[in-house]
Amino acid sequence: MAACQGNAYPMGAFLIMSSDHRIAAEGDYRIGMNEVAIGLTVPRFAIEIARQRLTPAYFSRAVMTGEMFGPVEAVTAGFFDRVVPADALERSAEETAQALATLNMAAHAATKARARGAVIKMIRAMIDEDITPQYGEDRVAKQASA
């Protein structure tokens, strides 16, 4: 499970979307995938994670335009499952973690594998294809020229 109380830009958004249950605190912050807004191409693995979690209308807005969302709209988009008052975030996270801990973990894992197994294999292959030594060299060279 994930609990968020502040800005979550690309990697934070991916980690949140990868969690089984996602809680956001009320607040003045943003979550999203801002790669295209800062001149980066969204990695294929990240697109697939977003495709699994975000609603179709928000998928395009988040991935293609880098739009960022406040916590309440991020629930509608699919980044979070719910928003709680900021002072209730820790308690809500603990309660959710305790509830999740009561699940039969073997059944949970097997069900999750059935539900997401094909996508996980595809994402793993994409990461292996995309994250190469050349990818790393290109990123270093781009940062050095900036």
Image (spheres, grey):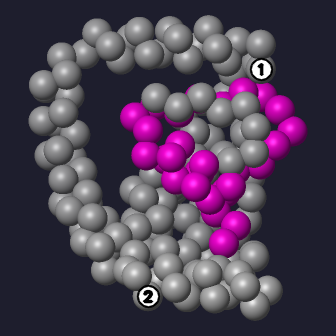
* Residue 57 makes an appearance in the image: no
135 in relation to 88, above or below: below
- Bounds of the magenta span? 9-35
* Residue 113 makes an appearance in the image: yes
Instruction: Farthest residue to the right: give it.
Output: 28
Residue 28 within the magenta-colored segment of the rendering? yes
Q: Secondary structure at mark 1?
A: helix
Image location (x, y in percent) of residue 119: 26, 61
Q: Nearer the viewer, mark 2 or mark 1?
A: 2
Q: Residues within 10 Å of mark 1 (few under 14, many from 20)?
A: some
146 in relation to 73, above or below: below
Q: Measuring 26% from the left and 57% from the top, which residue is drawn there?
A: 120
Instruction: Give the numbered dot on residue 134.
Output: 2
- Tell how many labels: 2
Give the distance between the C-alpha atoms of the residues marked 2 and 1, in whole angstroms. Answer: 43 Å
Pointer 1 residue: 86
Q: Amino acid at mark 2?
A: Gln
Where residue 129 sits, quadrant-wise, is bottom left
Q: Which of marks 1 and 2 precedes in the sequence?
A: 1
Instruction: Give the numbered dot on residue 64.
Output: none
Left or right position of 30 against 99: right
